[in-house]
Image (tube, rainbow, N blue to C red):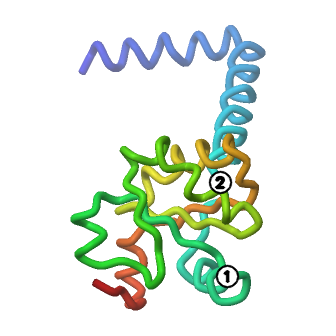
Amino acid sequence: MQALTQFLQQFFEFIGNHYLLTTAFLVVLTLLIVTEGRKAGKSITTQQATNLINRENAVVVDVRPKKDFAAGHIVDSLNIPHDSLPKRLVELDKYKDKPLILVCANGQHAGAYAKQLKAAGHNHVSRLSGGIASWRADNLPLVK
């Protein structure tokens, strides 16, 4: 406990002595987080996803493994498991003019795949916040 107290004391002393450096670090960190978040596509709720699907014919891309996809998925979604996404990107080229919604299990991994799609020229990429778990939690329909 004493080591923690000593560390915190030194930490706050450093911040006090180097407030400009600390402020610059926090600004750079914030900008990095915002920039990376934008590259990963917009995070959308289940309601926003439903609106995109119904109003703009958005294409849902489920990046979960085939076994999980078979256990329940969003109607008309495409299953392109995350491990085969780089090889199968060309399959999505015909949807470049449509919004894409990436779905994973819990919403934690879709951002990395959104970056790949954006790099491949897809401009309207979103990721379902909370993944298929949030879809289930909102009692929205799944098909098997």
Residue 51 horizontal/vertical position (percent): 66, 85
Between disc 1 and disc 2, the foreground one is 1
Residue 77 horizontal/vertical position (percent): 47, 75
Q: Residue at coordinates 36% horizontally, 19% vertically from top-left?
A: 5
Q: Residue at coordinates 67% horizontally, 65% vertically from top-left?
A: 95
Q: Nearer the viewer, residue 108 or 101?
A: 101
Is 74 above or below relative to 4? Answer: below
Q: Is residue 69 left or right of residue 122?
A: left
Is the C terminus in the top left, top right, bottom left or bottom right quadrant?
bottom left
Q: Which residue is mark 1?
A: 57
Residue 83 falls in image quadrant:
top left
Q: Which mark is residue 41?
A: 2
Residue 66 horizontal/vertical position (percent): 28, 62
Is 63 above or below relative to 10? Answer: below
What amino acid is found at the position of numbered circle 1 in the picture?
Answer: Asn
Q: Nearer the viewer, residue 18 or 120?
A: 120
